[in-house]
Structures are given as structure tokens and as C-alpha cells.
């Protein structure tokens, strides 16, 4: 990888090129083996440069946001992991609506704080989602009855061939925890949100209400990737897991949360193998006892 690192330094600062970097430092699960190279990029030109370099040298690329919906296996990721750090925020206040264009690398709580200061409402539900806006859109993430699809109107993407394109309205193909981007070889650069004017005290009150609810109902004191399993079409996943007596069940350092059975948590020394074995066990027990098949909400990547 030394030759590749030398080439990367033509456009990327040395401090943004990390060799044999532990992915446990870059995921909210706090597990995962090393990546060959982790490269932090701050604009579209840098992304294009790294993509071309990888393509010309036949190096696999993985795109990383905040690592909050991700489980990296214990032997890590080969090739280059591209960590998206596009952080621009542009606010356009019209007569009745506010349009906010947000770089894909912005973290949700940071966006929420900026919008609070600007007295812009409509983003409160997303303030506690532990990810970047890019991941938020890609997964059509949501909370408290709202999802990305309710506020996203336009997204700028960079195709792997280097073309910049706009995805508008229904082209996002938002579905429950899915979007068009899951099947698209493209990188999200930014997105435009349609929001509303609000009052600072009311926005802050709603954000605090949601924050308290999260702390009461979710095991935020432990590393996790958020909700491990998707909601069922005709069942509440956490309720089924609880009814199967799996709350508190553990394998190694991985445990089904006693606070919310839909979360698998890292109690401190879990490996990805522990978490994967626990996921498989939970799915097996629920299927045997209820006939319901659980589907993962998290993404799994890397070598065993």
C-alpha cells in the first residue's frame, strides 16, 4: 500500500490517510478489525480523485459515514474505506419554507443544533439519530413517526464514473429503511431539506422531549448500532424477542438489551463474532417460537 499512499498524498493531507486503522474507532458498535487504508475526504474533488485511483489500481472501496448502522467483522475491510467529511450547511429562507442544503458528512445532532440556533423547525425528530445525513438518507432513517422522506426533496450524488447528478422527489424511492441509494453505485454529496420557521423555545422543548424518551427507552449507555432488526409488517420486533425470553441473553460480550430487546449491545468486550452469533441465535429462536423471520436493519461488512 506504500505506493498508493504516496499517490494519495498528491490530493489528500497525510493526517487524513490512516493505514491499518481499527474500525472499532469508527463504528458506534466499537468493534471490527482493521481497514487497509482509511481516507477522510472533505470535498467532491477529493472523492473523485480517490475513486479514480482505486479504479485504476483495482482497489475495492467502501463508503463510511458515522459507522452508526454498521457491523464490521473481526478481520476488517480490505482496500480503501472512504470516510465522508463533507460538512457545508447552506440555509435559504423563503417566504413560507426554509430550504437547508447539508453536506453528507454532517452529523445529525450537529445539524439539529445549527437549526435550533437559526429557529428552523421540522428536524427535531432526527436530532438524536446517531449518524450522518448521508446515512440518514440512504437508510430513510426515522423516529417518532417521521422519516427522511418527509423532509428530503433533493440529493446530489457522485456516480462511480465521476458524474455529479441530482436525485429529485420520488426518484429517491424511499421505503421503510430503504432508498434508491442502496442499489446505486454512487456517493451522496449533499441533500436539500424542506423545513419550517419555528420558535427556539418550542424547538428546544420538542428536542428535549425526544432526548428524554430515547434515554428512557433505549440502551444509549452501551455501544450499539441502534435498532438491530427491522420492524415487522405485522409485528413489533422487540416485543417478539422479549416474549421469547431473550432479553439479557448474551454471547461473549454481546447482549440483547434488557432495556429494549430490539437492540443488541456491546457490554464492553464484544467481538463482531459474538454479535453475529447472537443475531443468528435471536433470529433462530424467534422463528422457531413464532414463525416470524427477523430482518436486519444494520449493515454487515468485512472479512470473518
Image: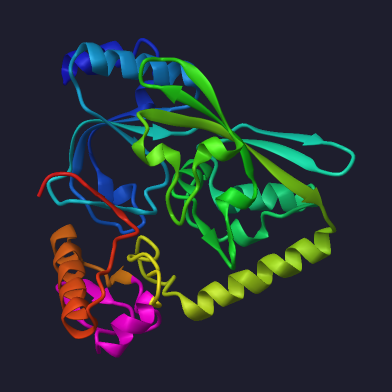
Q: Nearer the viewer, residue 41 or 259?
A: 259
Q: Is residue 276 left or right of residue 28?
A: left
Residue drawn at (34%, 79%) of the image: 261
Looking at the picture, how far across and down is residue 94, in whole percent? 85, 36
Q: Is residue 276 magenta?
A: no
| Depth check, front residue: 275 or 237 | 237
Q: Quadrant of the N terminus?
A: top left
Residue at the (74%, 38%) spot, across then down? 99
Provide residue 272's location: percent of width, then percent of height: 18, 58
Relative horizontal placement of residue 107, taking residue 14 as reference (left or right): right
- At horizontal 29% and vertical 63% (from top left) the residue drawn is 295
Corner quadrant of residue 256: bottom left
Chain part drawn in magenta: 237-263
Residue 127 visible? The answer is: no
Residue found farthest to the left: 304
Does residue 185 sit above or below 196 in this rendering?
Answer: above
Magenta span includes 241:
yes
Horizontal side, residue 208 vs residue 276: left or right: right
Residue 92 seen from this side: yes
Position of 225 relative to 91 (above/below): below
Percent position of residue 83, x then y: 38, 35
Residue in the foreground of this view, choosing between 262 and 210:
262
In the image, is residue 113 above or below residue 253? above
Amino acid at each position: 500500500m506504500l505506493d498508493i499512499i504516496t499517490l494519495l498524498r498528491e490530493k489528500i493531507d497525510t493526517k487524513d490517510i490512516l493505514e491499518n486503522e481499527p474500525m472499532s474507532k469508527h463504528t458506534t458498535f466499537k468493534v471490527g478489525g482493521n481497514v487497509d487504508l482509511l481516507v477522510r475526504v472533505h470535498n467532491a474533488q477529493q472523492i473523485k480523485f480517490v475513486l479514480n485511483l482505486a479504479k485504476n489500481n483495482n482497489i475495492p472501496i467502501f463508503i463510511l459515514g458515522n459507522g452508526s448502522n454498521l457491523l464490521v467483522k473481526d478481520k476488517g475491510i480490505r482496500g480503501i474505506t472512504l470516510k465522508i467529511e463533507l460538512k457545508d450547511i447552506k440555509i435559504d429562507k423563503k417566504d413560507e419554507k426554509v430550504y437547508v442544503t447539508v453536506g453528507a458528512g454532517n452529523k445529525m445532532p450537529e445539524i439539529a443544533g445549527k437549526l435550533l440556533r437559526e429557529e428552523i423547525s421540522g428536524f427535531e425528530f432526527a436530532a438524536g439519530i446517531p449518524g450522518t445525513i448521508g446515512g440518514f438518507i440512504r437508510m430513510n432513517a426515522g423516529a417518532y413517526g417521521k422519516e427522511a422522506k418527509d423532509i428530503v426533496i433533493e440529493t446530489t450524488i457522485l456516480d462511480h464514473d465521476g458524474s455529479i447528478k441530482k436525485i429529485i422527489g420520488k426518484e429517491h424511492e424511499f421505503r421503510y429503511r430503504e432508498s434508491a441509494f442502496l442499489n446505486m453505485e454512487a456517493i451522496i454529496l449533499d441533500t436539500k431539506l424542506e423545513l419550517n420557521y419555528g420558535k427556539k423555545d418550542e424547538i428546544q422543548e420538542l428536542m428535549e422531549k425526544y432526548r428524554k424518551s430515547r434515554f428512557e427507552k433505549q440502551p444509549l449507555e452501551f455501544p450499539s448500532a441502534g435498532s438491530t432488526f427491522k420492524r415487522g409488517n405485522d409485528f413489533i420486533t422487540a416485543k417478539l424477542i422479549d416474549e421469547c425470553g431473550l432479553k439479557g441473553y448474551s454471547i461473549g460480550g454481546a447482549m440483547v438489551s434488557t432495556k429494549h430487546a430490539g437492540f443488541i449491545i456491546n457490554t464492553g468486550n464484544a467481538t463482531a463474532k459474538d454479535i453475529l452469533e447472537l443475531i443468528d441465535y435471536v433470529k433462530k429462536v424467534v422463528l422457531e417460537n413464532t414463525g416470524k423471520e427477523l430482518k436486519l436493519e444494520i449493515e454487515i461488512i468485512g472479512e470473518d
